[in-house]
Image (tube, rainbow, N blue to C red):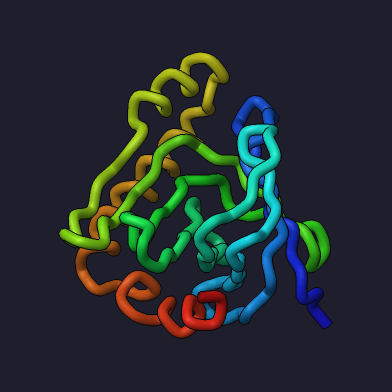
Amino acid sequence: MPSDVVRVIYRKYDGSAHRDYPARRLAEDDLGVWLGVPAGTESVYHGRPSVEQIPFVLLVPHHGWWTGMFNPPPRTSEVYCDIATPARWEGEETVHLIDLDLDVVRRRETGLVELRDEDEFAVHRARWGYPDDVVTEAEAASRWLLGALGDGTEPFATSYRKWLAVVV
């Protein structure tokens, strides 16, 4: 039986700490593993202790080069997708991801979908020597998400709402 609590660990490509927090396993379906993070959750962000002020739901897809964070108001991003290496699970209790800098975001008020942090991706690609296949997958995931967040593709249309309601 899967654990109720999953430790989510994001690192950067050079191995440095990015984000680390516990999440509650909500469900697993054909889209991936749904994790809930309530407000007040203690976390680590860029190596520093932090506390989540706004709850969110994280979808870790089974095979994708991204994760999806689904947010309630007042957060201005309704959906925030990190481009990351496919999840590497350590048992049922820990998921490891390597954040690849690029983000695809859908704004709550306008529905605008935007690609962010291309400059950071370029700098880290050169500094840390992202292999060509990693660059290809990251860019392909970004392109797919730019379309999917705007065209009604699930899980970005409505399916996340039932899970977000559980943690808000």
* Quarter holding residue 153: bottom left
As drawn, the residue found furthest toward the top would be 127
Q: In which quarter of the image is the N terminus?
A: bottom right
Return the residue nearer the eye: 32 or 131: 32
**From what the image shows, is residue 44 above or below residue 120?**
below
Horizontally, residue 81 falls left or right of residue 32, namely: left
Residue displayed at 46% across by 46% down: 83
Residue at left offset 42%, top offset 53%: 81
Residue 56, compared with residue 3, is above or below; it is above
**Residue 48 % position (x, y):** 68, 34
Q: Nearer the viewer, residue 111 or 85?
A: 111
Q: Where is residue 14 in the image (x, y as percent from the top left)?
A: 65, 25
- Give percent across and percent down for residue 112: 18, 55
* Residue at position x 74%, y 64% in the image: 6
Image point (30%, 75%), residue name:
157
Specify the quadrant of the image occupied by residue 16.
top right
Q: Looking at the image, which is closer to me, 37 or 140? A: 37
Q: Give the side of residue 49 with respect to residue 100, left or right.
A: right
Picture quadrant of residue 60: bottom right
